[in-house]
Image: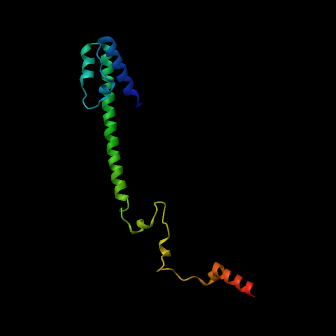
Amino acid sequence: MDPTYRLRIATRLHFLLLRRYGQDIEVSHLLKCGGRNHDGLWLCKATGDDELIALARLLAHANQLHAKDEARLREHALMSAAVSASNAPPAEMPWSFDTSGFGLTHPLHLNDESRPAAPRGGRRFNPLRWLKRREQRETA
């Protein structure tokens, strides 16, 4: 259903009631879905005007459909909230204290206590060793 359908009907009813009978029923009051036969729709039916009665019936039907859609959307939102809450990690995880929110600030395996030994092939690419070689060359 077009989202503006109810608004267009309620606006048409508002101006017809205002023009023909001098009754200023607010559009927001006509759009309330709580009661099926609230004052604005009751007034339209009580006038005996065929156009107002037809518009009042259309608005009552549109209000019912809107209420059903709202209930369905609320139910869907509750279901998705329940699913996302069950899949969400606990708020206080041990790794969460070392992060900035954009991933780990430093990888967990690089703590000072648990640093793995450097592999044998890694000696060649050690920058400190390069500096030592340079010093040896300069002194020689």
Between 79 and 29, the one nearer to me in the picture: 29
The image position of residue 10, as x and y in percent, is 35, 23
Q: Is residue 90 above or below residue 64?
A: below
The image position of residue 67, as x and y in percent, is 31, 35
Judge whether residue 126 can be spotted in this image: no
Which residue corresponds to the image point at 34% horizontal and 12% vertical from the top-left?
19
As drawn, is 5 to the left or to the right of 38?
right
Q: Is residue 134 above or below residue 16?
A: below
Q: Residue furthest front?
A: 139
Which residue corresponds to the image point at 39% horizontal and 69% vertical from the top-left?
94
As drawn, is 6 to the left or to the right of 130?
left
Between 60 and 136, the one nearer to me in the picture: 136
Q: Residue furthest right?
A: 140
- Residue 60 figure quarter: top left
Quarter of the image with the C terminus is: bottom right
Between 38 and 55, the one nearer to me in the picture: 38
Q: Is residue 88 above or below residue 98?
A: above
Number of callouts: 0
The image position of residue 107, as x and y in percent, is 49, 70
Quarter of the image with the N terminus is: top left
Judge whether residue 80 can be spotted in this image: yes
Q: Is residue 38 above or below residue 130?
A: above
The image position of residue 51, as x and y in percent, is 33, 15
